[in-house]
Image (tube, rainbow, N blue to C red):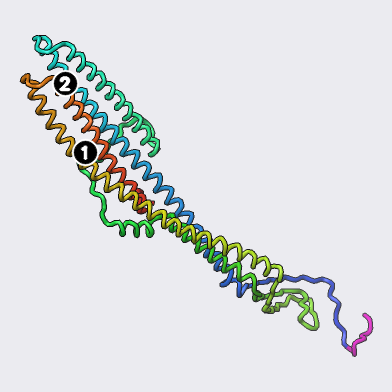
Amino acid sequence: MLPPSNGGFSFPVILDNIAFRGTVTIPITDIPLRLARVYEAAGLTEQARRLDEEAARNTAASEARVAYYELLRARGQHAVATQGVETAEAHRQDLARFVEVGTVARVELMRVEALLADAQRLEIAARQGVAMAEAQLRQRLHLEGDAPILLGESLEEIPAPPTNLAELIDRAWRSRPEIASLERQSGALDANLAATRAGIWPSLAGVFNVDIANPNQRFIPATPDFNTTWDATLQLSWSPNAALVAGRTASRLESQRAVLRASIQQLREGFEMEVRSAYLGAQTAAASAEAARRQLLAADESYRVRRERFAVGSAISSDLTDAETDLLRARFAVVNALVDARESLARLRRAVGEREVEN
């Protein structure tokens, strides 16, 4: 061993060194100013995506409801067309008896037979329309197989539309998921903007270290033993480059937020006009259905009177044919008007944000 050269003290030379270090860094200012805001923005963005999904589901459900009503229309038209064939056939049979006894010219029978053929054509077209409407509804509902579709609604009643337009507009603003989604996206931009602005300023972090070393340099004199020491430090850091980038990013986010808020206002105005249009359509459709029903009553009474007169020979065949045509048109008009009233209410429900299905 060399003689001591430090006033009589000597330290052993330890060649083997083993050390374990654990470090915990806590971003004191970043947690509330940046990380919490980023977490908040992520949650709001997730909510916005769920609301977008809900809007898509509602749109698909509304389209399926309209397809359902179109099947209701097709079956109603087929029923009317079948009645038209039966009415024309009864007229042809009555007229055939008159032709046999010589009280009516055969040309009248030929005209009625032509009308019967046209009624049969309408029945075939209506039957094909039912098949097409069923196929469309199956496609909307993703139904498989050829099982019959049972309709749970009839065309007996005229649905009454709501009358409080202001309440409907308010419901649309509160219930439409599209608006709620944009509001969540705006909130997410606010949170991201706050987190970005925090990057302009210095950040404070706490650092805690634990050392388990053999030898531990903090122990004097050093001994070949494991010893544990710790230290805690506060670090204040700031980067001019990061601050510059954060400022530019914040400006971009502010512009996006302004555009998004303008879109929300524009969407509110658009939904208001959509509700107003659907409301007017529902009111008009209900009035049209009532008018069509009254016209059907008049056409049915006219047909009854002319048929009775034709049966006793006081009315000519063309009068009864005209009454049959008017009755057939009135029946078709009632079916169309009643279905239109239901479809207009479906569009109004969609406009105010009423859910067709539960999520």
Residue identifier under label 1: 292
Q: Earlier in the sequence, mark 1 or mark 2?
A: 1
Q: Residue 171 location in percent, x, y?
A: 34, 58
Residue 326 appears in which quarter of the rendering? top left
Q: Is residue 118 left or right of residue 270?
A: left
Identify which residue is drawn at 31% across, 45% down. 344
Q: Which residue is mark 2?
A: 318
Q: Give the residue displayed 60% in from the left and 70% down from the top.
A: 197
Q: Nearer the viewer, residue 340 or 141?
A: 340
Residue sticking out furthest to the left: 312
Q: Is residue 178 above or below residue 139?
A: below
Q: Residue farthest to the right?
A: 2
Residue at 43%, 48% (x, y): give it.
56
- The quadrant of the rendering that contains the N terminus is bottom right
Q: Is residue 358 visible?
A: no
Instruction: Please provide percent x and percent y for residue 242.
Output: 68, 68
Mark 2 neighbour class, 10 Å CA radius: few under 14, some 14 to 19, many 20 or more: few
| Residue nearer the viewer, 269 or 69 | 269
- Residue 280 shows in the view: yes
Circle 1 or circle 2, nearest the eye: 2
